[in-house]
Image (cartoon, rainbow, N blue to C red):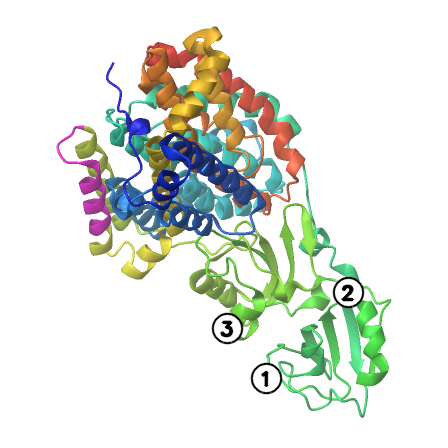
Amino acid sequence: MPTRGAGSRRIRAGSIFELAGERTLGFACRGHMVTVYILGLLVAAVVLFSMERLSVDMITLLLLLALLLPGILTPSEAFAGFSSDIIIILASIFVLSAALQGAGVLDWIGEQMRRHAKVGSPRFLFTLMGAVGATSSMMNNTTVTALFTPVVTGLARKGGVSPSKLLMPVAFASIMGGTCTLIGTSTNVAVSGFMQHQGLEPVGMFETTFLGVLILLVGIAYMMLIGVRMLPVRHAADVREGYALRQYLSEIVVREGSPLDGQSLGESDLAILDFNVLKVVRAGESLLPDVHLTIRAGDRLIVSGHIGDLMKVREIEGIDISADRHIVQTDLAPSEWHVSEVLVEARSQAVGRTLVELNLHRRTGALALAMYRHGHTLVESLENTRLREGDVLLVQANPGQISVLRDSLGLMPLDTPVPQPVNKRRGVAVLGVFLAAVILGSLGILPLSVCFLAAAVAAVLLKAVSIERAYHFIDWRLLILIGGMTAFGVAMEKTGTAELLAGAIVSALGGLGPHGVLAGFFLLTIALTQPMSNAAAALVVLPVAIQSAEILGSNPRTFAIGVMLAASVSFIAPLEPSCVLVYGPGKYRFFDFVKVGLGLTIVLAILVLLLLPVFWPL
């Protein structure tokens, strides 16, 4: 079997490492230095991904610079991943997803599920996971989760079912459904591109379909028989109860002579002290808490903030505090106002910014009351907390402002979803061009990248999605991640790091035979998907797995497909983007995913390892 020899290629002349090596320790030492450097970058990447202090795209760009500046990769090598047809395919699928959502197709699917099965019944769970899995087989799984989450949350609350009983199955089904086709998940597309770069045939559009369907069916059966019994039930009759807001809501009365008398709400001392005025009652009439509204003596205000802080300024500000008064939903806002939850999606303008930087209240009129993140509620210092993907904000807003939050900031309403109007003609047209792209690409009549790009352009021309929304819907961070990590895989091969690691792994597991080594890489990939994204983990392991297959004289395609599938059957930790998106809306805790996902991961790992050599002989 011919070897591609990428690991034996020398670092180009003139690089920092080569010059340093020639003047000091010689060629052998130079190679050792580069290998240690690459391994150090790998460890640093895993740590940075797990810490979540920096966004994944920023970490990827830092890795690229760390490979470019010493001359380990040339600019053409480092940026080749960004100019590949893989990026075009993924970007086009995001645009098509936006078009399908804009036509109201997913809202129509949700309504059909509700009509044909009682929400919360076993039949509904089967239908829901099947519909999500089937949709995810043709769209990016993270996008599918983002689109279905508000639909399912709305159905759950209408049906009196805890969203926590449905949202984790949605995330799991989207991930499993992604294994059915090449375009089902960005991991498949990224692995296929890397395989092609290594001289292997790319993954076919439906090459993994049979095994992927088995994965989905076994996963659904597991969730219906075992997983559903371990899913938590977290109801909240009053949505504010889940955010522990009661101690942060207080009623105050403005006395005569108070410094607040005559101040506008937006510029008042209360605003300076980080208190939000949620309601103003004047002479028995409820007034909207507009930032320009002037406070008057005798006004009764309901404010959010810690009562201890109010006590400290009570005399200075000339206010009376009704600390013992029981504040209920009808007190909190007039009938036309609502307290609602909104989800921070990956493409939201709010990611990485604070409420102060967003100027949320002045820009939209909505008030942020609290935030739910990874099992914890944040109320104090909320204005200066940087928002992350998957955060859920509790906001006070009317329906019009909820629409503004969704359209201008990308904050998806959960308990008061704004339905998309169904446009059957456009929906059918978009589905038609999508299916045409799949068929033409699968038959090899045109390259997949050309087919999907043409379909995306057609969707814009059909006015199913505006060009502005098309650009907004593309997950640029994911594209940067895939392009950059592909370059990192090239660097591992070019420097011999992949060959070195492969030799060490084969020496350790070679006694178990090719099946044992394959299982070792499978488990390694699952382990790396805990701190890293699925695509990043697969691209890190892939060059080492291919080198190991060559050393063993085995089929490198089997190892590559195994790594690809291993990245999509890992459900232990809620760090995969699809799981992050449902974490907040479902009010889950970290151990909820461990409890439900560990057994599912074990079952699917056994299934895949048994069937891999059947479909792709070693």
Residue 529 horizontal side relative to residue 289, left or right:
left
Frontmost residue, 118 versus 122: 122
Q: Which residue is mark 1?
A: 292
Q: Which residue is mark 2?
A: 327
Q: Quadrant of residue 47?
A: top right
Residue 502 horizontal side relative to residue 386, left or right:
left
Q: Distance from label 2 to label 3 (Cα)?
A: 28 Å
Give, as a three-letter code, the residue at label 2.
Answer: Ile
The region drawn magenta spans: 443-458
Q: Quadrant of residue 326?
A: bottom right
Can you say whether 226 is above or below 131 in the image? above
Ranked by sequence position, the earlier of labels 2 and 3 is 2
Q: Which residue is mark 3?
A: 363
Q: Quadrant of the C terminus?
A: top left
Image coordinates for residue 244, horizontal then vertical, percent = 74, 55
- Report whether residue 105 is seen: no
Residue 165 horizontal side relative to residue 469, left or right:
right
Image coordinates for residue 463, horizontal then vertical, percent = 25, 57
Label 2 crowd bin: few (<14), some (14–19), many (20+), radius 10 Å: some
